[in-house]
Image: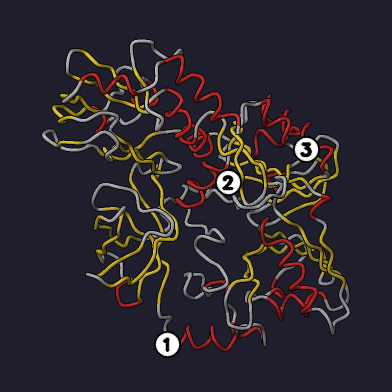
Amino acid sequence: MSESTEPLKKTPLHEVEKELGGKMVDFGGWELPVQFSGILEEHEAVRTKVGVFDVSHMGEVTVKGPQALELLQRATCNDVAKLDQGRIHYNGLLYPNGGFVDDILIYQNTPEDFFVVVNASNTDKDFEWLQQSAKDLDVDVKNVSADYAQLAIQGPEAERVLQPMTDVALADIKYYRFANGTVDGAPAIVSRTGYTGEDGFEIYTAPEHAPRILRKLVAAGVKPCGLGARDTLRLEAKMALYGNDIDQTTTPIEADLGWIVKLDKGEFAGRDILAHEKAEGPKRKLVGFEMVDRGIARHGYPVVDGSEEIGVITSGTHSPTLKKAIGLAYLPLDKSAQGTEFMVLIRGKETRARVVPTPFYKRAK
Amino acid sequence: MATPEDNRYAKSHEYVHLEGNVATIGITDYAQKELGDVVFVELPQPGTVLDAGDELGSIESVKAVSELFSPMTGEVVEINEALADNPALVNTDPWGDGWMIRMRVSDPTEVDELMTAEEYDEYIEKESAH
Protein backbone atom coordinates (compact mmCIF):
# COMPACT_ATOMS: atom_id res chain seq x y z
CA MET A 1 0.00 0.00 0.00
CA SER A 2 2.71 2.44 0.99
CA GLU A 3 4.47 1.85 -2.32
CA SER A 4 1.53 3.08 -4.30
CA THR A 5 2.02 6.49 -5.84
CA GLU A 6 -1.67 6.93 -6.57
CA PRO A 7 -3.25 9.74 -4.57
CA LEU A 8 -5.45 8.49 -1.75
CA LYS A 9 -9.15 8.32 -2.46
CA LYS A 10 -11.40 10.48 -0.30
CA THR A 11 -14.96 9.84 0.76
CA PRO A 12 -17.61 12.59 0.53
CA LEU A 13 -17.20 12.99 4.30
CA HIS A 14 -13.51 13.76 4.25
CA GLU A 15 -13.82 17.50 4.94
CA VAL A 16 -16.32 17.05 7.79
CA GLU A 17 -14.12 14.39 9.33
CA LYS A 18 -11.11 16.69 9.35
CA GLU A 19 -13.26 19.38 10.96
CA LEU A 20 -14.32 16.88 13.61
CA GLY A 21 -10.69 16.18 14.47
CA GLY A 22 -10.37 12.87 12.63
CA LYS A 23 -6.85 11.50 12.48
CA MET A 24 -6.58 10.41 8.88
CA VAL A 25 -4.68 7.34 7.68
CA ASP A 26 -4.21 5.34 4.49
CA PHE A 27 -6.63 2.41 4.59
CA GLY A 28 -6.28 0.31 1.46
CA GLY A 29 -5.88 3.39 -0.70
CA TRP A 30 -8.56 5.43 1.05
CA GLU A 31 -7.86 8.33 3.37
CA LEU A 32 -10.07 7.58 6.36
CA PRO A 33 -10.13 8.54 10.05
CA VAL A 34 -8.55 5.95 12.34
CA GLN A 35 -9.89 7.80 15.37
CA PHE A 36 -11.45 11.04 16.58
CA SER A 37 -11.44 11.30 20.38
CA GLY A 38 -9.69 7.94 20.95
CA ILE A 39 -10.37 4.29 20.20
CA LEU A 40 -11.39 3.29 23.75
CA GLU A 41 -13.79 6.20 24.12
CA GLU A 42 -15.36 5.58 20.71
CA HIS A 43 -15.65 1.86 21.37
CA GLU A 44 -17.37 2.53 24.68
CA ALA A 45 -19.78 4.98 23.05
CA VAL A 46 -20.95 2.33 20.59
CA ARG A 47 -21.35 -0.32 23.30
CA THR A 48 -23.29 1.95 25.66
CA LYS A 49 -24.77 4.82 23.59
CA VAL A 50 -24.29 5.45 19.89
CA GLY A 51 -21.54 6.21 17.39
CA VAL A 52 -21.34 6.91 13.67
CA PHE A 53 -18.84 5.54 11.15
CA ASP A 54 -18.10 6.67 7.63
CA VAL A 55 -18.13 3.49 5.54
CA SER A 56 -18.52 5.23 2.20
CA HIS A 57 -15.46 3.41 0.92
CA MET A 58 -17.50 0.18 0.79
CA GLY A 59 -18.47 -0.85 -2.73
CA GLU A 60 -21.99 -1.36 -4.07
CA VAL A 61 -22.89 -3.49 -7.06
CA THR A 62 -26.36 -3.94 -8.51
CA VAL A 63 -27.36 -7.25 -10.07
CA LYS A 64 -30.54 -6.98 -12.15
CA GLY A 65 -32.34 -9.01 -14.78
CA PRO A 66 -34.29 -12.23 -15.33
CA GLN A 67 -31.30 -14.35 -14.28
CA ALA A 68 -30.04 -12.18 -11.42
CA LEU A 69 -30.88 -14.87 -8.89
CA GLU A 70 -29.21 -17.55 -11.03
CA LEU A 71 -25.96 -15.54 -11.13
CA LEU A 72 -25.84 -14.98 -7.39
CA GLN A 73 -26.71 -18.62 -6.67
CA ARG A 74 -23.81 -19.79 -8.85
CA ALA A 75 -21.25 -17.35 -7.50
CA THR A 76 -21.99 -17.55 -3.77
CA CYS A 77 -22.37 -20.21 -1.08
CA ASN A 78 -25.42 -18.98 0.86
CA ASP A 79 -28.92 -19.63 -0.49
CA VAL A 80 -29.98 -16.41 -2.21
CA ALA A 81 -33.38 -17.92 -3.05
CA LYS A 82 -34.23 -17.74 0.64
CA LEU A 83 -34.21 -13.95 0.52
CA ASP A 84 -37.48 -12.12 0.05
CA GLN A 85 -38.23 -8.46 -0.49
CA GLY A 86 -36.51 -6.27 2.09
CA ARG A 87 -34.32 -9.04 3.46
CA ILE A 88 -30.51 -9.10 3.62
CA HIS A 89 -28.00 -11.84 4.22
CA TYR A 90 -24.29 -12.34 4.73
CA ASN A 91 -22.71 -14.41 2.00
CA GLY A 92 -19.42 -15.52 0.45
CA LEU A 93 -18.49 -14.77 -3.13
CA LEU A 94 -16.27 -17.77 -3.90
CA TYR A 95 -13.67 -19.02 -6.35
CA PRO A 96 -14.05 -22.56 -7.73
CA ASN A 97 -11.44 -23.71 -5.16
CA GLY A 98 -13.74 -22.56 -2.35
CA GLY A 99 -11.61 -19.55 -1.38
CA PHE A 100 -13.20 -16.15 -0.82
CA VAL A 101 -13.33 -13.60 -3.60
CA ASP A 102 -14.98 -11.50 -0.89
CA ASP A 103 -17.51 -11.61 1.91
CA ILE A 104 -20.58 -9.62 1.02
CA LEU A 105 -24.08 -8.53 1.99
CA ILE A 106 -26.92 -9.14 -0.46
CA TYR A 107 -30.06 -6.99 -0.31
CA GLN A 108 -33.11 -8.30 -2.19
CA ASN A 109 -35.52 -5.86 -3.82
CA THR A 110 -37.10 -8.50 -6.09
CA PRO A 111 -35.81 -11.87 -7.35
CA GLU A 112 -34.60 -9.89 -10.36
CA ASP A 113 -33.08 -6.97 -8.49
CA PHE A 114 -30.31 -7.27 -5.89
CA PHE A 115 -28.05 -4.73 -4.19
CA VAL A 116 -24.68 -6.21 -3.21
CA VAL A 117 -22.38 -4.53 -0.68
CA VAL A 118 -18.71 -5.47 -0.97
CA ASN A 119 -15.41 -4.63 0.70
CA ALA A 120 -13.81 -1.42 -0.56
CA SER A 121 -10.52 -2.89 -1.72
CA ASN A 122 -12.31 -5.78 -3.46
CA THR A 123 -14.84 -3.73 -5.38
CA ASP A 124 -13.18 -3.90 -8.80
CA LYS A 125 -12.24 -7.56 -8.39
CA ASP A 126 -15.76 -8.53 -7.27
CA PHE A 127 -17.38 -6.57 -10.05
CA GLU A 128 -15.17 -8.21 -12.68
CA TRP A 129 -15.72 -11.65 -11.17
CA LEU A 130 -19.49 -11.22 -11.19
CA GLN A 131 -19.44 -9.90 -14.75
CA GLN A 132 -17.33 -12.81 -15.88
CA SER A 133 -19.61 -15.29 -14.12
CA ALA A 134 -22.60 -13.62 -15.80
CA LYS A 135 -21.36 -14.07 -19.36
CA ASP A 136 -23.97 -16.60 -20.51
CA LEU A 137 -26.77 -15.17 -18.38
CA ASP A 138 -29.42 -12.53 -18.97
CA VAL A 139 -28.35 -10.21 -16.16
CA ASP A 140 -26.93 -6.72 -15.83
CA VAL A 141 -24.16 -6.19 -13.28
CA LYS A 142 -23.27 -2.58 -12.45
CA ASN A 143 -20.67 -1.07 -10.17
CA VAL A 144 -22.60 1.78 -8.54
CA SER A 145 -20.10 2.49 -5.73
CA ALA A 146 -19.63 6.11 -6.76
CA ASP A 147 -23.38 6.76 -6.42
CA TYR A 148 -23.43 6.02 -2.70
CA ALA A 149 -22.04 7.34 0.52
CA GLN A 150 -22.59 5.03 3.48
CA LEU A 151 -22.93 5.82 7.18
CA ALA A 152 -23.20 3.26 9.97
CA ILE A 153 -25.05 4.44 13.09
CA GLN A 154 -24.31 1.86 15.76
CA GLY A 155 -25.20 1.42 19.41
CA PRO A 156 -28.20 0.89 21.70
CA GLU A 157 -29.41 4.46 21.07
CA ALA A 158 -29.14 4.22 17.28
CA GLU A 159 -32.88 3.95 16.69
CA ARG A 160 -33.67 6.83 19.03
CA VAL A 161 -31.24 9.27 17.37
CA LEU A 162 -31.92 8.27 13.79
CA GLN A 163 -35.74 8.13 13.93
CA PRO A 164 -36.31 11.92 13.98
CA MET A 165 -34.26 12.21 10.76
CA THR A 166 -36.06 9.59 8.68
CA ASP A 167 -39.54 8.75 7.39
CA VAL A 168 -38.76 5.05 7.70
CA ALA A 169 -40.42 3.46 10.75
CA LEU A 170 -37.22 2.07 12.23
CA ALA A 171 -38.91 -0.05 14.87
CA ASP A 172 -40.52 -2.05 12.03
CA ILE A 173 -37.17 -2.93 10.46
CA LYS A 174 -35.95 -6.20 11.92
CA TYR A 175 -32.32 -7.31 12.06
CA TYR A 176 -30.92 -7.85 8.56
CA ARG A 177 -33.85 -6.14 6.89
CA PHE A 178 -34.01 -2.82 5.04
CA ALA A 179 -36.41 -0.23 3.71
CA ASN A 180 -36.23 2.52 1.10
CA GLY A 181 -37.14 5.97 2.32
CA THR A 182 -35.51 9.29 3.11
CA VAL A 183 -32.96 10.45 5.66
CA ASP A 184 -32.99 14.19 6.26
CA GLY A 185 -35.00 14.52 3.06
CA ALA A 186 -32.52 12.59 0.92
CA PRO A 187 -33.52 9.31 -0.73
CA ALA A 188 -31.81 6.51 1.17
CA ILE A 189 -31.65 2.79 1.80
CA VAL A 190 -31.87 2.15 5.54
CA SER A 191 -30.89 -1.29 6.86
CA ARG A 192 -30.65 -2.76 10.33
CA THR A 193 -27.11 -4.06 9.90
CA GLY A 194 -23.64 -3.30 11.14
CA TYR A 195 -20.16 -4.47 11.90
CA THR A 196 -19.99 -3.86 15.63
CA GLY A 197 -22.09 -6.55 17.35
CA GLU A 198 -24.43 -3.80 18.52
CA ASP A 199 -27.89 -2.79 17.34
CA GLY A 200 -27.75 -0.17 14.63
CA PHE A 201 -28.41 0.95 11.09
CA GLU A 202 -26.53 1.51 7.89
CA ILE A 203 -27.74 4.16 5.47
CA TYR A 204 -26.85 4.49 1.82
CA THR A 205 -27.47 7.82 0.18
CA ALA A 206 -26.13 10.04 -2.60
CA PRO A 207 -22.68 11.50 -1.77
CA GLU A 208 -23.87 15.14 -1.68
CA HIS A 209 -26.24 14.47 1.22
CA ALA A 210 -23.82 12.59 3.44
CA PRO A 211 -21.91 15.54 4.99
CA ARG A 212 -25.15 17.21 6.08
CA ILE A 213 -26.46 13.98 7.61
CA LEU A 214 -23.19 13.33 9.45
CA ARG A 215 -23.18 16.86 10.89
CA LYS A 216 -26.75 16.47 12.11
CA LEU A 217 -26.04 13.14 13.72
CA VAL A 218 -23.01 14.54 15.53
CA ALA A 219 -25.04 17.58 16.62
CA ALA A 220 -27.62 15.14 18.03
CA GLY A 221 -24.92 13.65 20.23
CA VAL A 222 -23.77 10.71 18.11
CA LYS A 223 -20.05 10.15 18.60
CA PRO A 224 -17.93 10.16 15.44
CA CYS A 225 -15.91 6.93 15.34
CA GLY A 226 -12.96 5.79 13.27
CA LEU A 227 -11.49 2.61 11.84
CA GLY A 228 -9.70 1.79 15.10
CA ALA A 229 -12.92 1.36 17.08
CA ARG A 230 -14.57 -0.33 14.10
CA ASP A 231 -11.85 -2.99 14.29
CA THR A 232 -12.03 -3.58 18.07
CA LEU A 233 -15.85 -3.70 17.92
CA ARG A 234 -16.03 -6.15 15.02
CA LEU A 235 -13.37 -8.37 16.54
CA GLU A 236 -15.20 -8.62 19.89
CA ALA A 237 -18.27 -9.66 17.90
CA LYS A 238 -16.10 -12.07 15.87
CA MET A 239 -17.00 -10.63 12.51
CA ALA A 240 -14.45 -11.54 9.87
CA LEU A 241 -12.26 -8.94 8.20
CA TYR A 242 -11.36 -9.68 4.59
CA GLY A 243 -7.59 -9.54 4.10
CA ASN A 244 -7.01 -10.46 7.75
CA ASP A 245 -9.19 -13.43 8.71
CA ILE A 246 -10.39 -14.53 5.28
CA ASP A 247 -9.07 -14.24 1.74
CA GLN A 248 -8.70 -16.24 -1.48
CA THR A 249 -6.75 -18.96 0.35
CA THR A 250 -9.38 -19.62 3.03
CA THR A 251 -12.76 -21.32 2.67
CA PRO A 252 -15.93 -20.48 4.65
CA ILE A 253 -15.65 -23.84 6.40
CA GLU A 254 -12.10 -23.13 7.56
CA ALA A 255 -13.22 -19.68 8.64
CA ASP A 256 -15.92 -21.22 10.87
CA LEU A 257 -18.59 -19.73 8.63
CA GLY A 258 -20.27 -23.05 7.86
CA TRP A 259 -23.66 -21.44 8.53
CA ILE A 260 -23.42 -19.52 5.24
CA VAL A 261 -22.64 -22.69 3.24
CA LYS A 262 -25.87 -24.18 1.87
CA LEU A 263 -24.87 -27.35 0.04
CA ASP A 264 -28.49 -28.23 -0.78
CA LYS A 265 -29.14 -25.14 -2.89
CA GLY A 266 -27.68 -26.60 -6.10
CA GLU A 267 -24.41 -26.12 -7.95
CA PHE A 268 -22.14 -23.20 -7.03
CA ALA A 269 -18.47 -22.22 -7.16
CA GLY A 270 -16.46 -24.27 -4.70
CA ARG A 271 -19.33 -26.57 -3.72
CA ASP A 272 -17.42 -29.87 -4.03
CA ILE A 273 -14.55 -28.71 -1.87
CA LEU A 274 -16.87 -27.27 0.76
CA ALA A 275 -18.95 -30.47 0.81
CA HIS A 276 -15.77 -32.45 1.39
CA GLU A 277 -14.62 -30.10 4.17
CA LYS A 278 -18.02 -30.18 5.81
CA ALA A 279 -18.03 -33.99 5.83
CA GLU A 280 -14.38 -34.67 6.71
CA GLY A 281 -13.52 -31.49 8.59
CA PRO A 282 -11.15 -28.84 7.26
CA LYS A 283 -7.39 -29.10 7.84
CA ARG A 284 -7.39 -25.91 9.85
CA LYS A 285 -9.96 -23.79 11.57
CA LEU A 286 -10.35 -20.16 12.57
CA VAL A 287 -10.70 -19.96 16.35
CA GLY A 288 -11.00 -17.24 18.95
CA PHE A 289 -8.31 -16.99 21.58
CA GLU A 290 -7.29 -14.94 24.55
CA MET A 291 -3.78 -14.39 25.80
CA VAL A 292 -2.72 -16.29 28.90
CA ASP A 293 0.63 -14.52 29.17
CA ARG A 294 0.92 -10.76 28.84
CA GLY A 295 1.13 -9.28 25.39
CA ILE A 296 -1.01 -8.83 22.31
CA ALA A 297 -0.78 -11.28 19.42
CA ARG A 298 -1.41 -9.37 16.22
CA HIS A 299 -2.09 -10.12 12.55
CA GLY A 300 0.59 -12.30 10.98
CA TYR A 301 2.29 -13.49 14.18
CA PRO A 302 3.17 -17.21 13.91
CA VAL A 303 1.69 -19.93 16.11
CA VAL A 304 4.44 -22.41 16.95
CA ASP A 305 4.87 -25.88 18.37
CA GLY A 306 8.56 -26.17 19.20
CA SER A 307 10.42 -25.19 16.06
CA GLU A 308 7.44 -25.87 13.84
CA GLU A 309 5.06 -23.16 12.63
CA ILE A 310 1.59 -24.67 12.93
CA GLY A 311 -0.70 -21.70 12.51
CA VAL A 312 -1.05 -17.96 12.26
CA ILE A 313 -2.76 -15.08 14.05
CA THR A 314 -5.19 -13.28 11.73
CA SER A 315 -6.48 -10.56 14.06
CA GLY A 316 -5.55 -9.49 17.55
CA THR A 317 -6.13 -6.56 19.81
CA HIS A 318 -6.81 -5.41 23.32
CA SER A 319 -10.54 -5.87 23.90
CA PRO A 320 -11.84 -2.65 25.42
CA THR A 321 -14.98 -4.39 26.73
CA LEU A 322 -13.29 -7.46 28.23
CA LYS A 323 -10.09 -5.60 29.10
CA LYS A 324 -7.89 -8.41 27.88
CA ALA A 325 -5.96 -9.39 24.78
CA ILE A 326 -8.07 -11.35 22.29
CA GLY A 327 -7.80 -12.45 18.70
CA LEU A 328 -8.45 -14.94 15.94
CA ALA A 329 -6.05 -17.58 14.63
CA TYR A 330 -5.94 -20.45 12.17
CA LEU A 331 -4.98 -23.63 14.03
CA PRO A 332 -4.75 -27.26 12.92
CA LEU A 333 -8.15 -28.91 13.49
CA ASP A 334 -6.82 -31.24 16.21
CA LYS A 335 -5.52 -28.25 18.19
CA SER A 336 -8.58 -26.07 17.81
CA ALA A 337 -10.78 -27.32 20.68
CA GLN A 338 -11.87 -24.83 23.31
CA GLY A 339 -9.44 -24.64 26.20
CA THR A 340 -6.44 -25.76 24.12
CA GLU A 341 -3.33 -23.74 24.90
CA PHE A 342 -0.90 -22.75 22.18
CA MET A 343 2.20 -20.61 21.73
CA VAL A 344 2.39 -17.41 19.72
CA LEU A 345 5.70 -15.84 18.80
CA ILE A 346 5.51 -12.21 19.87
CA ARG A 347 8.66 -10.47 18.74
CA GLY A 348 10.57 -13.72 18.98
CA LYS A 349 9.21 -14.69 22.39
CA GLU A 350 6.95 -17.70 22.92
CA THR A 351 3.80 -16.41 24.59
CA ARG A 352 0.87 -18.53 25.79
CA ALA A 353 -2.66 -18.17 24.43
CA ARG A 354 -5.81 -20.27 24.85
CA VAL A 355 -8.70 -21.15 22.53
CA VAL A 356 -11.95 -19.67 23.89
CA PRO A 357 -15.61 -19.64 22.80
CA THR A 358 -16.74 -16.88 20.46
CA PRO A 359 -18.12 -14.31 19.99
CA PHE A 360 -16.05 -12.62 22.66
CA TYR A 361 -18.90 -10.19 23.19
CA LYS A 362 -22.62 -10.68 22.67
CA ARG A 363 -25.04 -7.89 23.41
CA ALA A 364 -27.95 -8.48 25.78
CA LYS A 365 -31.16 -8.69 23.78
CA MET B 1 1.23 20.42 25.93
CA ALA B 2 4.48 22.35 25.63
CA THR B 3 7.63 20.27 25.32
CA PRO B 4 9.47 20.64 28.67
CA GLU B 5 12.77 22.43 28.29
CA ASP B 6 14.50 20.57 31.11
CA ASN B 7 14.36 17.27 29.18
CA ARG B 8 16.34 15.94 26.23
CA TYR B 9 14.79 14.00 23.36
CA ALA B 10 15.61 11.02 21.14
CA LYS B 11 14.55 10.67 17.50
CA SER B 12 12.57 7.60 18.53
CA HIS B 13 10.49 9.91 20.77
CA GLU B 14 11.75 8.99 24.23
CA TYR B 15 12.58 11.77 26.63
CA VAL B 16 15.32 11.86 29.27
CA HIS B 17 15.06 13.89 32.42
CA LEU B 18 18.50 13.82 33.98
CA GLU B 19 19.18 14.63 37.64
CA GLY B 20 22.79 13.94 38.60
CA ASN B 21 23.44 10.53 37.13
CA VAL B 22 19.84 9.28 37.31
CA ALA B 23 17.77 9.56 34.14
CA THR B 24 13.98 9.34 34.14
CA ILE B 25 12.84 8.04 30.77
CA GLY B 26 9.43 8.07 29.15
CA ILE B 27 7.82 8.86 25.82
CA THR B 28 6.83 12.30 24.62
CA ASP B 29 3.38 13.79 24.39
CA TYR B 30 3.67 13.66 20.59
CA ALA B 31 4.49 9.94 20.75
CA GLN B 32 1.57 9.08 23.02
CA LYS B 33 -0.80 10.94 20.72
CA GLU B 34 0.52 9.06 17.72
CA LEU B 35 0.11 5.74 19.52
CA GLY B 36 -3.38 6.38 20.83
CA ASP B 37 -4.76 4.56 23.87
CA VAL B 38 -1.92 2.67 25.54
CA VAL B 39 -3.04 -0.66 26.99
CA PHE B 40 0.18 -2.41 27.94
CA VAL B 41 3.78 -1.39 28.58
CA GLU B 42 6.52 -3.99 28.68
CA LEU B 43 9.57 -2.86 30.63
CA PRO B 44 12.91 -4.46 31.56
CA GLN B 45 13.67 -5.80 35.04
CA PRO B 46 15.61 -3.48 37.36
CA GLY B 47 19.27 -4.42 37.08
CA THR B 48 19.15 -4.70 33.29
CA VAL B 49 22.11 -2.98 31.66
CA LEU B 50 21.44 -1.22 28.37
CA ASP B 51 23.47 0.60 25.77
CA ALA B 52 22.11 3.71 24.13
CA GLY B 53 19.96 2.51 21.21
CA ASP B 54 19.17 -0.89 22.76
CA GLU B 55 15.58 -2.03 22.82
CA LEU B 56 14.18 -1.07 26.17
CA GLY B 57 10.71 -2.54 25.92
CA SER B 58 7.53 -2.14 24.00
CA ILE B 59 4.27 -0.24 24.17
CA GLU B 60 1.03 -1.74 22.97
CA SER B 61 -1.74 0.63 22.08
CA VAL B 62 -5.13 -0.60 20.92
CA LYS B 63 -3.96 0.15 17.40
CA ALA B 64 -0.41 -1.16 17.22
CA VAL B 65 2.77 -2.10 19.00
CA SER B 66 5.88 0.06 19.06
CA GLU B 67 9.31 -0.53 20.42
CA LEU B 68 11.00 1.60 23.00
CA PHE B 69 14.69 2.34 22.73
CA SER B 70 17.06 3.35 25.47
CA PRO B 71 18.28 6.88 24.81
CA MET B 72 21.26 6.40 27.15
CA THR B 73 23.72 3.82 28.47
CA GLY B 74 23.32 2.59 32.02
CA GLU B 75 21.55 0.30 34.45
CA VAL B 76 17.80 0.23 35.04
CA VAL B 77 17.27 0.97 38.74
CA GLU B 78 13.50 1.39 38.89
CA ILE B 79 10.49 0.83 36.66
CA ASN B 80 7.14 2.55 36.95
CA GLU B 81 5.05 -0.20 38.56
CA ALA B 82 1.89 1.93 38.28
CA LEU B 83 1.85 1.35 34.53
CA ALA B 84 1.05 -2.34 35.01
CA ASP B 85 -2.40 -1.49 36.36
CA ASN B 86 -2.86 1.84 34.67
CA PRO B 87 -1.02 2.02 31.33
CA ALA B 88 -3.24 4.96 30.35
CA LEU B 89 -0.98 7.17 32.51
CA VAL B 90 1.27 7.27 29.44
CA ASN B 91 -1.54 9.09 27.64
CA THR B 92 -2.80 11.28 30.43
CA ASP B 93 0.52 12.37 31.92
CA PRO B 94 3.46 11.42 29.67
CA TRP B 95 5.84 13.92 31.30
CA GLY B 96 4.88 13.05 34.87
CA ASP B 97 3.14 9.93 36.22
CA GLY B 98 3.49 8.20 32.85
CA TRP B 99 7.30 7.86 33.13
CA MET B 100 8.68 4.41 32.37
CA ILE B 101 12.09 3.71 33.86
CA ARG B 102 14.81 5.28 35.97
CA MET B 103 18.33 4.53 34.89
CA ARG B 104 21.70 5.09 36.55
CA VAL B 105 23.63 6.36 33.55
CA SER B 106 27.29 5.52 32.99
CA ASP B 107 28.11 8.81 31.31
CA PRO B 108 25.87 11.83 31.99
CA THR B 109 27.47 13.75 29.12
CA GLU B 110 25.87 11.29 26.69
CA VAL B 111 22.73 13.39 27.14
CA ASP B 112 24.28 16.15 25.04
CA GLU B 113 23.87 13.98 21.96
CA LEU B 114 20.10 14.14 22.36
CA MET B 115 17.87 16.92 21.05
CA THR B 116 16.83 19.96 23.05
CA ALA B 117 13.12 20.81 23.38
CA GLU B 118 13.43 23.33 20.58
CA GLU B 119 15.20 20.88 18.28
CA TYR B 120 12.64 18.18 19.07
CA ASP B 121 9.72 20.50 18.30
CA GLU B 122 11.25 21.24 14.90
CA TYR B 123 11.85 17.53 14.37
CA ILE B 124 8.25 16.51 15.03
CA GLU B 125 6.95 19.36 12.94
CA LYS B 126 8.86 17.93 9.98
CA GLU B 127 7.82 14.38 10.82
CA SER B 128 4.11 15.18 11.02
CA ALA B 129 4.26 17.17 7.78
CA HIS B 130 4.54 14.06 5.61
The first of marks 2 and 3 along the sequence is 2
Q: Disc 1 marks which amino acid?
A: Glu
Tag 3 residue: A210
The first of marks 1 and 3 along the sequence is 3
Q: Is residue A112 left or right of residue A318?
A: right
Q: Which chain does the numbered disc 1 sit on?
A: A
Tag 2 residue: A199
Tag 1 residue: A280
Instruction: Tally the numbered discs.
Output: 3
- What residue is at 78 percent from the left and 62 percent from the top? A61
Query: Looking at the picture, does residue B63 appear above or below residue A338?
Result: above
Does the residue at mark 2 contact the one at mark 3 (Cβ under 8 Å)?
no
Does the residue at mark 1 contact the one at mark 3 (Cβ under 8 Å)?
no
Give the alpha-carbon distance from disc 2 to disc 3, as whole Å: 21 Å
Q: Which chain does the numbered disc 3 sit on?
A: A
Judged from the image, the secondary structure of the residue bearing numbered disc 3 is: helix
Q: Disc 3 marks which amino acid?
A: Ala
Farthest residue to the left: give it.
B47
Q: Which chain does the numbered disc 2 sit on?
A: A
- What residue is at 66 percent from the left and 44 percent from the top? A152
Query: Looking at the picture, does residue A200 appear above or below residue B18?
Result: below
The first of marks 2 and 1 along the sequence is 2
Q: How far across and down, in percent of the image, does residue A255 sit?
A: 48, 70
Are the numbered discs 1 and 3 placed on the same chain, yes or no?
yes
Does the residue at mark 2 contact the one at mark 1 (Cβ under 8 Å)?
no
Residue A90 lies in what quarter of the image?
bottom right
Q: How far across and down, in percent of the image, does residue A43 sit?
A: 49, 38
- What residue is at 74 percent from the left and 63 percent from the top? A124
Are the numbered discs 2 and 3 placed on the same chain, yes or no?
yes
Give the alpha-carbon distance from disc 1 to disc 3, as whole Å: 48 Å
